[in-house]
Image (cartoon, helix red, strand yellow):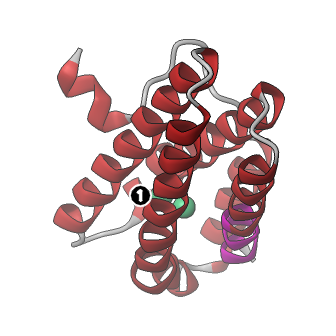
Amino acid sequence: MITDILLKEHKELDIDISKFLENPSTSNLDNIKDKLLLHIYKEEEIIFPLIKNEELKIRGLEMEHFAALTLLEKIYYYLKHNSIDLVIKRAEGLKRLLYQHNLIEESEIYTKLNYFDKDLIESVKNKILNAKIPVGWKCIASRNFL
Ligand SMILES: [Fe+2]
Ligand SMILES: [Fe+2]
C-alpha cells in the first residue's frame, strides 16, 4: 500500500517529464518541481530512516536526489534564457536519471517496507499521505554543500 503510493508518484513524475518535453513551459516545470521535491521529502524524512543496514545505498540515493534537483534548476535557467536545445537535453537527462534511480528504489528499498508490522505501515502511510514540506527544507545531500 505505501509502495503503491510511492510507485504512483514515480509514474506520475515520468509522465510529467514527458509532458514537459512535448511542451517545455514554466508551469509544466513548476509542476515537476513541486511533485519531485515532495516525493524526495517523503523518502528522505519518512521512508529512508526506517530502512536498516542500507546506509551506503541510501547515501547514494540521496546524492541522486541532489543531482536531480540541481538538474532541475539548470532547466529553469536554460528555460529563462530560451536555450530550448539545452532545456530538452537536460530534461531528457533528468528522465534517465530518475528512471535508473527509481529502479533501485523500487527493487531494493521499497520492497523492505513489506516486512514492517501492520501498525508501523499504517502510521507511515498516514505520514506519507499528509506530508507537507517545511519552509526552507533542503534535501539531505545538499546540506553538505551549503
Ligand atoms: Fe528517490
Ligand atoms: Fe522515489
When asked about the image quadrant of residue 23, the answer is: top right
Residue 130: x, y in percent? 78, 42
Residue 57, percent from left and from top? 24, 67
Q: Which residue is the site of mark 1?
A: 48
Establish whether ligand 1 lies closer than 8 Å to the Cβ of label 1. no
Q: Where is residue 54 in the image (x, y as percent from the top left)?
A: 24, 70
Q: How crowded is mark 1: few (under 14 residues within 10 Å), some or many (20 or more)?
A: some
Residue drawn at x 75%, y 47% is: 20
Ligand 2 appears in which quadrant? bottom right
In the rendered image, the quadrant that contains the C terminus is top left
Task: Write the start and end of the magenta stretch as one range.
Answer: 2-10
Residue 23 appears left or right of 75: right
In front: 20, or 124? 20
Q: Nearer the viewer, residue 145 or 25?
A: 25
Which SS type dominates the magenta stretch? Answer: helix
Q: Callout 1: helix, strand or loop?
A: helix
Question: Which residue corresponds to the image point at 29% horizontal and 70% vertical from the top-left?
Answer: 52
Vertical order, 118 against 96 (above or below): below
